[in-house]
Image (tube, rainbow, N blue to C red):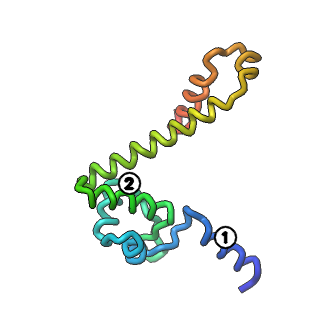
Amino acid sequence: MPPEARTRATGRLDDDDYPAFTMGRAAEMIGATPAFLRAIGEARLITPLRSEGGHRRYSRYQLRIAARARELVDAGTPVESACRIIILEDQLEEALRLNEQLRQVPDAEESATGRGNLGATRTRERHESRNGS
């Protein structure tokens, strides 16, 4: 294998979004069954990529989400509810992150533009761009 191909392959192993794990291995890693992974996929919590042969492949990021869902289900939460909780937690985390970024905007920028509500404008612009509006 050429050195650049080795470097690319090694880089993928460090990539949280690289779909490196088969369904069986993913289920084993989080202590669940393949049926559980299919169930959270049907609930649209995670969408595994497919190999050329059509087999599901999971990333480390997806496995962390699946492990969180498993914790909730093990505590007695129905699968659909667990998935909704995780989605809401993720949305809250994103909103808090955006809020913190907006707080980092220097006061000088608001004064220079004369826009007292710069943060709300930026949030609206981000929302519209993410939703294709």
First in sequence, mark 1 or 2: give its number: 1
Q: Tell me: 15 left or right of 131.
A: right
Q: In this rendering, does residue 55 appear at all? A: no
Residue at point 76% right, 21% down?
Answer: 108
Q: Residue at x 56, y 32 (%)?
A: 99
The percent coordinates of residue 126 (x first, y second) are 58, 33
Check disc 2 and report its element: helix, strand or loop.
loop
x, y percent for residue 79: 27, 55
Q: Quadrant of residue 123?
A: top right
Give the label on residue 54, or none.
none
Q: Residue at x 31, y 55 (%)?
A: 72
Comparing 129 with 110, the one in front is 110
Residue, far front: 75
Q: Position of residue 83 (x, y in %)?
A: 33, 51
Dot 1 falls on a residue whose secondary structure is helix
Residue 98 visible in the picture? yes
Between the C-alphas of marks 1 and 2, the distance is 26 Å
* Amino acid type, mark 2: Leu
- Residue 45 falls in image quadrant: bottom left
> Going by the image, does 112 lie left or right of 50?
right
- Judging by the rendered image, the residue that carries numbered circle 1 is 11
Give the residue type that dot 1 points to.
Gly
Dot 1: within a 10 Å radius of its alpha carbon, few (fewer than 14), some, or many (20 or more) residues? few
Could you say which is closer to the camera, residue 89 or residue 24? 89
Circle 2 Cα neighbour tier, 10 Å, few/some/many (<14 / 14–19 / ≥20): many
Residue 116, placed above or below residue 81 = above
Taking 46 as reference, is 115 left or right? Answer: right
**Contact, mark 1 vs mark 2 (Cβ under 8 Å):** no
Q: From the viewer's side, name the closer residue of 93 and 20.
A: 93
Q: Which mark is residue 45?
A: 2
